[in-house]
Amino acid sequence: MSSPSTNAPLAPGLSNSTQSYGRVAKSFHWLTALLILTAIPLGIISNNMPFETSEELARKALVFSIHKTVGITAFFVALARILWAITQPRPAPLHPERKAETLAAEVVHFTLYGSIVLVPLSGWIHHAATTGFAPIWWPFGQNLPFVPKSDSIAETFAALHVILERVLIISLFLHIAGALKHRFVDRDSTLARMLPGATALPDLAPHKTGLLPPIGAVVAFIAAIGVGAALGKFSHSEAQTEAASLEAVASDWVVQDGSLGFTVAQMGQPVTGTFEEWTAAIRYDEASGTGDVEVTIAIGSLSLGQVTGQALGTEFFDATAFPTALFIADIAPADGIEGATHMATGTLSLKGVDLPLTLPFSLEVTEGTATMSGTLPLARLDFGIGPNYSDGSQVGLNVTVETALTATRAQ
Ligand code: HEM
Ligand code: HEM
């Protein structure tokens, strides 16, 4: 086989030529390589770091923040790089007669171009759909337009991020293996023309990239997402703990509608948890404004976004050992408490700890329908919740319980 004659070393200009990459394309290539090869180990390390204590969680969040910030930087560099590449001729392959090898190399180039946009974008959407996680270190906020806070969006994009990141890693492996083969087996200038400096290159006829390489890359992405789906990567995680099923209670006032939840700061951002299952037995005399109440809460019915499972674990609510919480209290008119008409004074039994407390609330009864709402600050450590997260930097020490309901008088 005749090999093309090699010219004297050619110093690259800013732009690409048929022969070689220009200085801008080379700079973009190696800057992307640096960012991507930093983001990958940081992602794997941060994802596998333990978070059993406040200090461990702080360390994990720090590494995650670096991962996300490097990843977002890679995203914008990738966009600029692709815009530049579109305006540029692509250097022709040094062995165009090796059709299969050339096609494989080009398919991999397209999966790389695709993944340097899709991997950080999926991570970013996952991040924007959740609350209370390691922040991106930049001044433009943590949210994205059109991305609502949603557990299912967050879980779907977390799965996509991991699947696409695998496509990126496999493509990179093939890409680097190809570059090394050119260098050490073929001993040609394929790697050299991507490195800084002048390279001696043969005359090359212009090469046209057909539609096959981008189509091949799209097929690779679809196949990877299909494999991910078949492996159940998109099935949304359910909290492991079964919620205790609560018997209906006899009550003078029957709850028609209501909510019971709490807000706590997670990494400085408020996150809200709600209990789906709870009952309230209420006696209330309108004339005197007094009565009593017994609220039973199925702890396992908690949903707290991405950290529900962790919240139900032994460190926090320990829902298996303590499946229900109980609040038994007497109702009386509020004694000068601002913003409240009534108060419920009694005992909260939570995670094996009984503590006296008073819940101030506002109550209005119109035509047999009572509407109440109240909030109550609690110190979670008093109930042994999250003792290893005792400094409050990652999981706030104060929790605000929020409840609201409407009830009608039983017939
Ligand atoms: C240490 C690792 C790397 C080596 C040794 C390497 C080597 C090369 C070489 C030699 C080329 C030129 C191929 C040719 O002339 O046909 C190239 C092109 C390319 N590389 Fe890399 N690369 C590395 C890392 C990366 C990374 C991390 C990415 C992105 C995720 C990447 C994406 C690309 C793309 C998209 C092209 C095609 C550029 C174009 O023709 O438009 N490379 N690489
Ligand atoms: C080029 C950019 C990026 C690369 C190469 C990358 C790569 C990775 C890798 C390898 C993992 C580990 C997955 C595993 O353990 O299997 C990971 C996880 C993660 N990354 Fe990225 N990432 C990038 C950008 C981003 C960005 C921009 C964000 C958010 C703003 C982000 C958020 C995350 C999150 C939240 C996880 C954990 C996923 C989970 O819960 O399973 N990443 N990433």
Image (cartoon, rainbow, N blue to C red):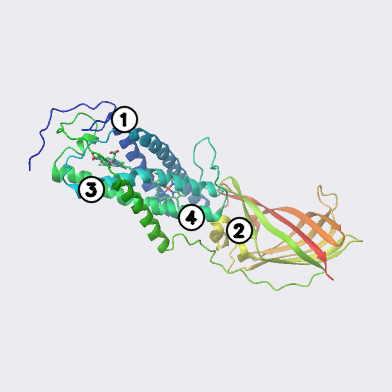
Q: Residue 43 location, x and y as percent?
A: 41, 48
In the rendered structure, which disc, 4 or 2, sits on the residue that comes first in sequence? 4
Among numbered discs 1 and 2, the one appearing first in the sequence:
1
Q: Residue at x 13, y 41 (%)?
A: 187
* Left or right, residue 101 beside residue 51: left
**Earlier residue among tags 1 and 3:** 1
Residue 1, located in which quarter of the rendered image?
top left
Q: Position of residue 76 (x, y in %)?
A: 42, 37
Residue 177: mark in rendering: 3
Dot 4 or dot 1, earlier in sequence: 1
Among the two numbered marks 3 and 2 on one chain, the one whose residue lies closer to the N terminus: 3
Q: CA distance from mark 4 to mark 3?
A: 32 Å
Crowding at dot 4, Cα within 10 Å, few <14 / some 14-19 / many 20+, comes out as some
Viewer-closest of 255 and 239: 255
Q: Secondary structure at mark 2?
A: loop
Query: Which mark lies nearer to you, 1 or 3?
Result: 1
- Amino acid type, label 4: Thr
- Indicate left or right for 409 with 262 as reference: right
Q: Amino acid at mark 2?
A: Ile
- Given residues 169 and 55, the one toward you in this image is 169
**What SS does tag 1 mark?**
helix
Three-letter code, disc 3:
Ala
User: What residue is disc 2 on?
Assistant: 385
- Say which residue label 4 marks: 156
